[in-house]
Image (spheres, rainbow, N blue to C red):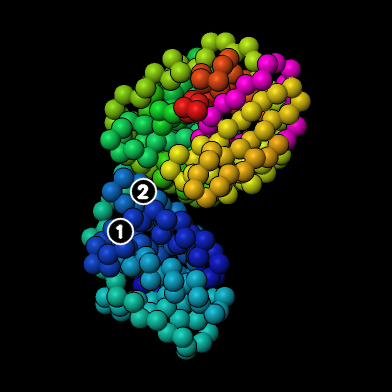
């Protein structure tokens, strides 16, 4: 096996592969990245116990072959490589990495046989397509609300379903909920809700752009997602997702609106004094203004104020500041509305004007 390639082209793909790998044990095959050179292209594969990745990049193949290399060290070598063109060759169980037109530096890295690398599953179900921009927006508006409580594993992923004319994504940790829906092509068959692990979703939104389509295939156990030259797949989370519709308030007659940037700035300032376990902040809402403060602690307290549009009675609501900050960060709109009915019931956060998503947050005890 022998090929030459551009450093930056290879580095981009190895970064993704190493993100997929969860093990850092050099003697385990799942710590390795699979490389196969033929027909002037390089197939790259990586996997852990649940998520799989495959892509293909152009290279100059001198000798066909396949092997696997320890991902962590391979990424480190390519990242620090001082030349633009890399030559990669293999002799028995050793791979040699050096500049294409220089002798040094020369790295010798032990490899493991490609035959030991597990097969990556292939979908036997049909794929459907949707704009990749829509998919990215759906993930960005939901994935941060996933629960990290492993005892409630059925909330450790993003719920996705297709019915009627829309695809929906929902995430919750029991104290907040993120909901987003996009219109779907009528040709896409309805499917029952699935629960997607966040790892594959976070990797995709970091690597995908806003142009083109994304292809998705589902079966009872797995999801397959393809775009550009990338092929991802993941085992789905089993279990029954909570009935999210029961959490959505039927009516909220009080509301205020604030500028998104002003709200994020005041939360950033107040968070410096927030108690680290509770993350509790208080919103004291009055006509024309909102006071944001931390609770009293051994360190001290802080109170700040921003303008808001509100004409109701004064009210004080206790909230986890992270549950406010994360939706505001996910949104890009200049003006944000907060709807509520009382200080002790759920609040709804949505853009102005309303779009196809919203966030629900449960208040804390004062």
Q: Secondary structure at mark 2?
A: strand
Q: Residue at x 39, y 18 (%)?
A: 243
Q: Secondary structure at mark 1?
A: loop
Q: Residues within 10 Å of mark 2 (few under 14, many from 20)?
A: many
Within the image, what quadrant is residue 155 found in?
Answer: top left
Q: Which mark is residue 52?
A: 2
Earlier sequence position, callout 1 versus callout 2: 1
- Of labels 1 and 2, the one closer to you: 1
The boundaries of the magenta stretch are: 306-329
Q: Nearer the viewer, residue 102 or 331?
A: 331
- Apparent side of residue 288 relative to residue 315 in the rendered image (left or right): right
- Apparent side of residue 95 relative to residue 59 in the rendered image (left or right): left
Q: Nearer the viewer, residue 62 or 160?
A: 160
Note whether 13 is above or below 157 in the view shown.
Answer: below
Quadrant in which the N terminus is drawn = bottom left
Q: Which mark is residue 23?
A: 1
Residue 314 in percent (x, y) is at 66, 20
Residue 291 in percent (x, y) is at 67, 33
Q: Is residue 83 magenta?
A: no
Q: Residue at x 52, y 61 (%)?
A: 12
Q: Is residue 310 magenta?
A: yes
Is mark 1 in CB contact (under 8 Å) with mark 2?
Answer: no
Residue 264 in percent (x, y) is at 65, 41
Note whether 307 is above or below 183 in the view shown.
Answer: below
Q: Residue at x 34, y 53 (%)?
A: 47
């Amino acid at each position: 096996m022998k090929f030459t390639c551009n450093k930056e082209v290879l580095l981009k793909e190895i970064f993704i592969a190493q993100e997929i790998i969860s093990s850092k044990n050099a003697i385990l095959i799942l710590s390795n990245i699979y490389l196969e050179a033929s027909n002037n292209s390089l197939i790259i594969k990586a996997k852990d116990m649940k998520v799989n990745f495959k892509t293909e990049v152009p290279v100059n193949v001198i000798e066909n072959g396949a092997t696997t290399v320890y991902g962590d060290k391979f990424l480190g070598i390519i990242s620090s490589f001082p030349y633009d063109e890399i030559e990669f060759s293999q002799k028995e169980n050793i791979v040699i990495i050096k500049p294409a037109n220089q002798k040094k530096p020369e790295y010798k890295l032990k490899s493991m046989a490609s035959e030991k690398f597990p097969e990556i599953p292939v979908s036997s179900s049909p794929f459907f397509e949707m704009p990749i921009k829509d998919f990215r927006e759906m993930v960005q508006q939901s994935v941060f609300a996933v629960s990290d409580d492993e005892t409630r594993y059925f909330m450790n992923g993003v719920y996705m379903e297709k019915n009627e004319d829309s695809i929906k994504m929902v995430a919750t940790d029991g104290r907040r909920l993120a909901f987003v829906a996009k219109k779907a092509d009528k040709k896409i068959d309805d499917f029952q809700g699935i629960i997607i692990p966040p790892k594959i979703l976070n990797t995709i939104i970091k690597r995908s752009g806003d142009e083109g389509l994304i292809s998705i295939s589902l079966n009872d156990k797995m999801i397959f997602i393809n775009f550009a030259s990338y092929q991802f797949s993941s085992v789905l989370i089993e279990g029954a997702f909570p009935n999210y519709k029961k959490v959505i308030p039927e009516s909220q007659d009080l509301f205020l609106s604030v500028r998104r940037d002003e709200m994020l700035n005041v939360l950033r300032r107040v968070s410096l004094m927030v108690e680290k376990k509770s993350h509790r902040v208080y919103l004291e809402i009055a006509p024309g203004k909102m006071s944001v403060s931390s609770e009293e602690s051994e360190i001290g307290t802080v109170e700040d104020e921003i303008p808001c549009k509100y004409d109701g009675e004064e009210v004080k609501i206790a909230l986890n500041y992270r549950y406010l900050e994360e939706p505001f960060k996910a949104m890009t709109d200049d003006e944000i509305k907060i709807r509520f009915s009382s200080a002790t019931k759920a609040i709804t956060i949505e853009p102005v004007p309303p779009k196809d998503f919203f966030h629900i947050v449960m208040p804390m005890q004062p």
